[in-house]
Amino acid sequence: MSKNKKIAVKGTEITIVNDGKNDFISLTDMLKAKDGEFFISDWLRNRNTVEFLGVWESVYNPDFNYGEFAIIKSQAGLNSYKISVKEWVNKTNAIGIKATTGRYGGTYAIKVLHKAIDFCTSIN
């Protein structure tokens, strides 16, 4: 990812990066504004989140892996269920959310999906 910029939301700087085609907003930066312990993997444990991501991917991603999605969806919400963003992407070929390492590392959601807004409401 490259070409990053920042926006201020209620006093918190949120990074937006562009991969050459799309803008991605930092979910990691949003978590910094939240008091208490909350992790993106907790968000991905939620069955509603998994269903939301699956519906979006099925509409916008022709390479979405429905078979792996069905397995993940059947486990979502169970106490023993846990998945990372990288696992989600690797298993389902997801394009709407990604985890990166390095200088601008973190978890990002494609800005136009409004996943970031859904994410904010789920941690608020």
Image (spheres, grey):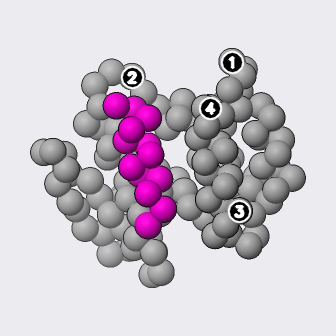
Residue 75 appearing in the image:
yes
Determine the image quadrant of residue 30.
top left
Is the residue marked by circle 3 packed among few (<14), some (14-19), or many (20+) residues within 10 Å?
some
Determine the image quadrant of residue 3.
bottom left
Is the residue marked by circle 2 packed among few (<14), some (14-19), or many (20+) residues within 10 Å?
few
Q: Residue 79, which numbered label?
A: 1
Mark nearer the N terminus (2 vs 3): 2
Q: Residue visible at 68% across and 26% down?
A: 77
Mark nearer the N terminus (3 vs 1): 3
Residue 84 appearing in the image:
no
Mark nearer the N terminus (2 vs 1): 2
Residue for badge 3: 58
Q: Amino acid at mark 2?
A: Glu
Place of residue 24 in the rendered image (x, y in percent of width and height, measured from the top left): 42, 64
Residue for badge 4: 45
Is 55 or 4 nearer to us in this picture?
A: 55
Determine the CA span between mark 3 and mark 4.
19 Å
Place of residue 84 in the rendered image (x, y in percent of width and height, measured from the top left): 61, 41
Q: Amino acid at mark 1?
A: Asn
Determine the CA span between mark 1 and mark 4.
9 Å
Mark nearer the N terminus (4 vs 2): 2
Determine the CA span between mark 4 and mark 2.
15 Å
Read off the magenta span. Answer: 112-124
Place of residue 57 in the rendered image (x, y in percent of width and height, measured from the top left): 66, 61
Q: Residue 37, which numbered label?
A: 2
Q: Residue furthest top?
A: 79
Q: Amino acid at mark 4?
A: Arg
Location of residue 71 with respect to 24 vertically, above or below: above
